[in-house]
Image (cartoon, rainbow, N blue to C red):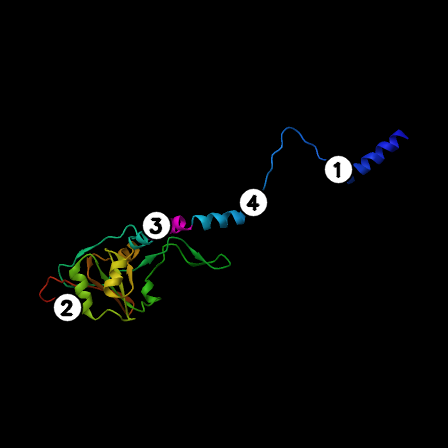
Amino acid sequence: MRFRLILIGLFFIPLFAKEVIFYVGKTYPFAEENFIVAIHNYIRTHKKEIEKKLAKIRQKAKEQIKEWKPKGIDPLTPARKNRVFYPDLTYTLPFDIKDQYGRVIYPKGFKFNPARYVHLSYGIIVINANRKKEIEWLKKSGYLHSIAWRIFITDGSWYDTIKELKQQVYYCLPQIEKRFKLKHTPSIITQVGDKIRVQEICLDCNNSKK
């Protein structure tokens, strides 16, 4: 009988446990504020301060973007004579190229000229945007505002150059300088057949021309 009473007691305890409150030590009132409401209230009461901080952050980010420039670009020196050359674009495979069955299609050491397979669909004008003379030359050259040409800069601010030329410009990345063997500015890059033609323009020469 005693055992049965214990079992009955254990069975009914959970049903009435919610009505039992134990107090241990001092008690204090506690109100948990909704987290979203708390954020909303903070924003509302600190609106001007938050907007001021956000304005500073946006301005700083804008300045950083304006001043951004890729690393490793060589500004290049001004051309001292008019010259035309055809850089060797030959590429040597550093590894085997295999098909899905593991058969070698092109072995390591295979050499090829990319210009035979890919055609440069536009010409490239390369200048140093920090040299006023080159900017003025470009404005008078007839290359601006044409889908047939892209403007690359080796130095200067891309942001200021776009504002002055009213045209999109691109940085002449180190890979481009190296691949086309660029040494001086202004340089005009075009494709002739399966060759790349680079024309250096001497702005200080009496017979300088486009």
Report the residue marked by disc 2: 209
Report the residue marked by disc 4: 33
Select label 3 or label 2 by which is in front. 3
The kind of secondary structure element at disc 1 is helix
Q: Quadrant of the N terminus?
A: top right
Toward which corner of the image does residue 162 lie, by quadrant?
A: bottom left
Horizontal placement of 110 versus 138: left or right? right
Horizontal placement of 2 versus 146: left or right? right
Give whichever of discs 1 and 3 has the lower sequence position: 1
Asked if residue 194 is positioned above or below residue 43 in the image, the reply reads below
Select label 4 or label 3 by which is in front. 4
Select label 1 or label 4 by which is in front. 4
How far apart marks 1 and 2 lie (CA) works out to 98 Å
The kind of secondary structure element at disc 4 is loop
As drawn, the residue found furthest toward the left would be 206
Give whichever of discs 3 and 2 has the lower sequence position: 3
The magenta stretch spans which residues?
A: 47-59
Contact flag, marks 1 and 3 (Cβ < 8 Å): no
Q: Is residue 175 one of those drawn in magenta?
A: no
Label annotation for residue 17 = 1
Q: Amino acid at mark 3?
A: Lys
